[in-house]
C-alpha cells in the first residue's frame, strides 16, 4: 500500500501540471484578447480624435470667415445706423 501512495501523489502532481498549463494557456489567450481590444480602442480613439480636430479646424475657419464678414459689413452698416 505504501507503493500506491507515492504513485497516487505522482498522479495528483501530474494532473495538476496540465491544469496549470491550461490555466496558463487561458491566461495568455485572455492577455492576447485584451491586447487586441486595446489596439482596437486605440485605433478608434485616434480616428475619432483626428476627426474631432479636423471638425474643430473647420469650425475655426468658418468662425474666422464669419467674423471677417461681420467686420467688413459692420463698417458700412455702423455708419448708416449711427445717423
Image (cartoon, grey):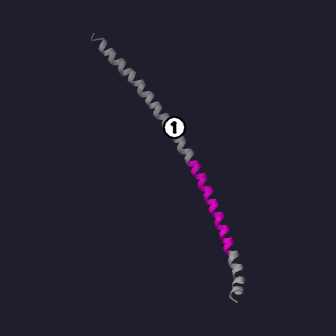
Q: Which residues are magenta?
A: 42-67
**Position of 10 relative to 64 (above/below):** above
**Position of 9 relative to 31 (above/below):** above
> Is 40 on the left-hand or right-hand side of 10?
right
Rendering quarter of residue 51: bottom right
Q: Residue at x 54, y 41 (%)?
A: 36
The location of residue 25, given as percent across then percent down, is 47, 30
The location of residue 70, given as percent across then percent down, is 68, 76
Q: Residue at x 64, y 60 (%)?
A: 55
| Chief secondary structure of the magenta portion | helix
Residue positioned most to the bottom: 83
Please tell me whether residue 60 belongs to the stretch shown in magenta: yes
Q: Residue at x 51, y 37 (%)?
A: 32
Disc 1 designates what residue? 32
On-image quarter of the C terminus: bottom right
> Is 2 on the left-hand or right-hand side of 63?
left
**Position of 31 relative to 78 (above/below):** above
The location of residue 15, given as percent across then percent down, is 39, 21
Rendering quarter of residue 20: top left
The location of residue 80, given as percent across then percent down, is 72, 86
Rendering quarter of residue 64: bottom right
**Position of 22 relative to 55 (above/below):** above
- Please tell me which residue lies in front, 52 or 18: 52
Residue positioned most to the left: 2
> Is 44 on the left-hand or right-hand side of 18?
right
- Please tell me which residue lies in front, 52 or 83: 83
> Is 67 on the left-hand or right-hand side of 29?
right
How many other residues sit within 10 Å of disc 1, few (<14), some (14-19) or many (≥20)? few
Dot 1 lies on which element?
helix
Amino acid at each position: 500500500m505504501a507503493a500506491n501512495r507515492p504513485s497516487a501523489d505522482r498522479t495528483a502532481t501530474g494532473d495538476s501540471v496540465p491544469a496549470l498549463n491550461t490555466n496558463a494557456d487561458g491566461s495568455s489567450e485572455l492577455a492576447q484578447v485584451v491586447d487586441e481590444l486595446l489596439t482596437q480602442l486605440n485605433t478608434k480613439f485616434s480616428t475619432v480624435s483626428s476627426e474631432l480636430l479636423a471638425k474643430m479646424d473647420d469650425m475655426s475657419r468658418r468662425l474666422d470667415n464669419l467674423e471677417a464678414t461681420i467686420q467688413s459689413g459692420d463698417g458700412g452698416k455702423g455708419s448708416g445706423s449711427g445717423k
